[in-house]
Amino acid sequence: MKRALLTCSIFVLLAACNPSGNDRDQTLLFWSSNNAGEIAFSEERAAAWNNNNPSTTLQYQPVPEGQSSEEIILAAVVGKTTPDIYANMWQGSVEFYANAGVLVPLDTLEG
């Protein structure tokens, strides 16, 4: 149930990323956990999104291999190579990233 709720939330956020009237094609990079079940689920959801939203492509990629997903996302933040959507964040690190200014408040998005 939690996974379904999280996924629905992610795709609601995606819908907000493509305000009406925007004719440009967009590609969004989506990272999630790299375990087999999550990969299969995310690939399925990304394919469904792409079939229903031709102007906004969701490019799915499992979190790259590393010692921990926290280490990988921190390296991506430092290297300015973060994905547009990240669905594998430990709740304890959210405050750290918010204070660092690398998270986008949802109420600042158009749409």
Image: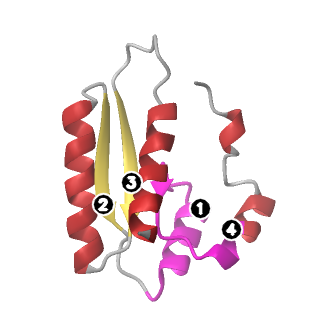
Q: Residue 61: give its label.
A: 2
Q: Which residue is mark 4?
A: 94
Residue at 52% over, 64% down: 76
Q: Residue 30: give its label.
A: 3
Q: Position of residue 64 (x, y in %)?
A: 36, 72
Looking at the image, residue 19 lies above or below residue 71: above
Lower sequence index among marks 4 and 1: 1
> CA separation, marks 3 and 2?
6 Å
Looking at the image, residue 97 lies above or below residue 64: above
Residue at 56% over, 54% down: 80
> CA separation, marks 4 and 1?
13 Å
Say which of marks 1 and 2 sits in front. 2
| CB within 8 Å, label 1 to label 2 | no
Residue at 70% over, 34% down: 108
* Residue in front for this viewpoint, 71 or 105: 105
Looking at the image, residue 42 lies above or below residue 35: above
Instruction: Examine the image and state in which quarter residue 3 appears.
Output: bottom left
Q: Residue 77: give its label.
A: 1
69 vs 97, left or right, is left
Instruction: Examine the image and state in which quarter residue 43 appears.
Output: bottom left
> CA separation, marks 1 and 2?
16 Å
Mark 4, other Cα within 10 Å: few <14 / some 14–19 / many ≥20 = few
Give the residue at the far bottom of this rendering.
Answer: 67
Q: Secondary structure at mark 4?
A: helix
| CB within 8 Å, label 3 to label 2 | yes
> CA separation, marks 3 and 1?
15 Å
Q: Position of residue 11 (x, y in %)?
A: 42, 45
